[in-house]
Image (cartoon, rainbow, N blue to C red):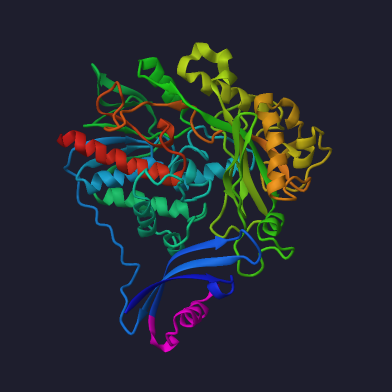
């Protein structure tokens, strides 16, 4: 006999299979010796009030053998002699597009401007030591894209994008931990995700696909209104039956060469702001409603905040419990910060982007740039932050309560940002349309999370790469560019996703649309 149960347990009860089994026995009246197997199929934390509870959905097998829940397997066919499709970018959109193309019997040729994950690690080490920025290999560019070394959260708010479960299964098949199969908000971690990505690349190559690193695409090969391939920075040409463009939200040069070529683009909304960092213990106390914090059995607490401030949305973005802040710029004279968490979420810090919606009236002075006007506004804020920072990649920072009250911070607390921080009046130089709303938003968030606004916390500038300010428009049904036949804009860089999971789903869907188009 098989039963499904919903359980609400204490963190300690949910921490061990034997205690869960005892809870099942108490709930159902079934003797523990008669429970032949117990599988957790969903796990979440209910921290709305004290005491915190763990909610479990479990499958219970009584006096019968249970199937192994970990036997999900993927088989990628040999496509070495199949028709070739060019995939530009090896982030989640590009990698999942490539794997899905293989499943559909097409050969992906993946072109990535940056290095593989091992090469990226060396460049990131230099960046974090405030020594050098490689503009082609950093936290945004390289194998795995912007998510590879920045966190590894797998979550999407949309229920309409596609098969989220498939994405989780693919990551798990390639080496991600078992927990991602059951957690409501699964998280691989910045320490584990690079290895998973390396395994995904090996799957592509073993199946006959190709992956080329340090191969930046600088243009399209167009024949009338059809794309036939791409041209790289060293003059090489790659041709294929279609081109999936999955270049990420920071590939500004791609937007520029598309615009120069006459390929239609359009401005879109996005958000910018700061990254705030608190002691993790403080966030634990607030979120778990206990002066004792999370205790022995709960994970580092997270939060999700949003508010309407003077007609615009302000919200937390990419919250990283037990994480660190990293330098995320891609060019000289830019200051950009982002956050990441290792799989254990075990640092003393909690950080999150706190950002404000950007609207067209904010960048009217760049109207001569057409659809790239928002991109210029984004660049301007990053240049301002750079000027107000320290030497190299030292970030401008301010204690949080001082920022809200408009005071200069005469000193700064310890921080996870390795290149270093320098006290700077962010309240003064961040443009009013962002800065004044941020200050009001923090006050509103403090009413939701008492103690959130404190000088134990600090803000760093700037969080500007939440998503792309440009969209590469495509047909709603076919996913092809509305102007160029055979060009399939994909993922965050195209303006159709926002994070690892949604980009991966969009990559799979783009691959499916390519196959339909080729066979139609």
In the displayed structure, does residue 156 sit left or right of residue 363?
Answer: left
On whether residue 287 falls in the magenta region, the answer is no
Residue 424 found in image quarter? top right
Give coordinates of residue 431: x percent, y percent.
Answer: 67, 24
In the displayed structure, does residue 457 sit left or right of residue 257?
Answer: right
Residue 405 found in image quarter? top right
- Answer yes or no: is residue 336 visible: no
Give coordinates of residue 34: x percent, y percent.
Answer: 39, 87
Q: 420 or 462: nearer the eye?
A: 462
Give coordinates of residue 365: x percent, y percent.
Answer: 58, 13
Vertical comparison of 359 with 82: above or below: above
Q: 207 or 235: nearer the eye?
A: 207
Q: 332 or 102: nearer the eye?
A: 102
Give coordinates of residue 300: x percent, y percent.
Answer: 62, 59
Which residue is depicted at the point 23% across and 42% down? 107
Vertical comparison of 14 with 347: above or below: below
Which residue is depicted at the point 42% across and 47% down? 501
Vertical comparison of 412 with 24: above or below: above
In the displayed structure, does residue 193 sit left or right of residue 212?
Answer: right
- Answer yes or no: is residue 353 visible: yes
**Where are the magenta residues, as a range?**
15-36
Tell which residue pokes out farthest to the top in this image: 368
Q: Quadrant of the N terminus?
A: bottom left
On whether residue 17 falls in the magenta region, the answer is yes
Which residue is depicted at the point 72% across and 46% down? 447
Q: Main secondary structure of the magenta part?
A: helix
């Amino acid at each position: 006999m098989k039963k499904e149960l919903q359980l609400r347990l204490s963190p300690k009860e949910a921490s061990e299979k034997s205690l869960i089994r005892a809870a099942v026995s108490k709930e159902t009246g079934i003797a523990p010796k008669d429970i032949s197997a117990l599988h957790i199929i969903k796990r979440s934390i209910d921290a709305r009030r004290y005491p915190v509870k763990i909610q479990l959905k479990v499958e219970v097998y009584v006096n019968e053998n249970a199937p192994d829940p970990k036997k999900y397997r993927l088989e990628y066919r040999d496509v070495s002699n199949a028709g070739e499709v060019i995939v530009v970018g090896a982030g989640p959109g590009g990698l999942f597009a490539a794997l899905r193309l293989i499943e559909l019997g097409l050969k992906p040729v993946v072109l990535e401007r940056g290095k593989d994950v091992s090469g990226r690690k060396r460049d990131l080490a230099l960046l974090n030591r405030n020594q050098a920025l490689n503009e082609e290999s950093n936290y945004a560019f390289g194998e795995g894209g912007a998510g590879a070394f920045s966190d590894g959260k797998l979550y999407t708010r949309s229920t309409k994008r596609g098969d989220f479960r498939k994405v989780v299964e693919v990551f798990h098949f390639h080496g991600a931990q078992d927990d991602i199969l059951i957690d409501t908000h699964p998280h691989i971690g910045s320490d584990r995700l690079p290895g998973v990505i390396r395994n995904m690349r090996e799957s592509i190559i073993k199946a006959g696909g190709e992956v080329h690193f340090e191969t930046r695409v600088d243009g399209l090969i167009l024949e009338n209104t059809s794309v036939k391939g791409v041209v790289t920075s060293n003059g090489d040409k790659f041709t294929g039956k279609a081109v999936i463009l999955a270049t990420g939200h920071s590939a500004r040069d791609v937007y520029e060469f598309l615009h120069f070529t006459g390929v239609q683009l359009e401005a879109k909304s996005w958000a910018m702001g700061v990254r705030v960092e608190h002691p993790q213990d403080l966030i634990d106390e607030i979120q778990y409603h206990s002066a004792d914090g999370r205790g022995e059995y709960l994970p580092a607490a997270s939060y999700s905040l949003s508010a309407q401030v003077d007609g615009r949305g302000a919200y937390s973005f990419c919250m990283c419990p037990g994480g660190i802040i990293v330098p995320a710029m891609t060019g000289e004279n830019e200051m950009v910060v982002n956050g990441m968490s290792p799989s254990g979420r075990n640092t003393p810090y909690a950080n999150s982007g706190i950002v404000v919606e950007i609207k067209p009236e904010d960048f009217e002075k760049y109207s001569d740039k057409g659809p790239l006007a928002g991109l210029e506004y984004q660049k301007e804020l990053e240049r301002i932050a750079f000027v107000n920072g320290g030497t190299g990649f030292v970030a401008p920072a301010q204690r949080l309560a001082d920022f809200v009250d408009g005071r200069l911070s005469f000193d700064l607390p310890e921080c996870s940002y390795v290149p270093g921080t320098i006290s700077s009046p962010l309240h003064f130089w961040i443009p009013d349309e962002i800065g004044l709303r941020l200050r009001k938003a923090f006050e509103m968030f403090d009413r939701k999370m008492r103690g959130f606004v404190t000088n134990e916390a600090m803000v760093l500038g700037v969080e500007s790469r939440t998503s792309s300010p440009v969209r590469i428009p495509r047909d709603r049904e076919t996913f092809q560019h509305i102007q160029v036949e055979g060009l399939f804009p994909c993922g965050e860089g195209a303006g159709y996703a926002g994070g690892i999971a949604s980009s991966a789903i969009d990559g799979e869907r783009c691959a499916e649309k390519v196959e339909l188009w080729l066979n139609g």
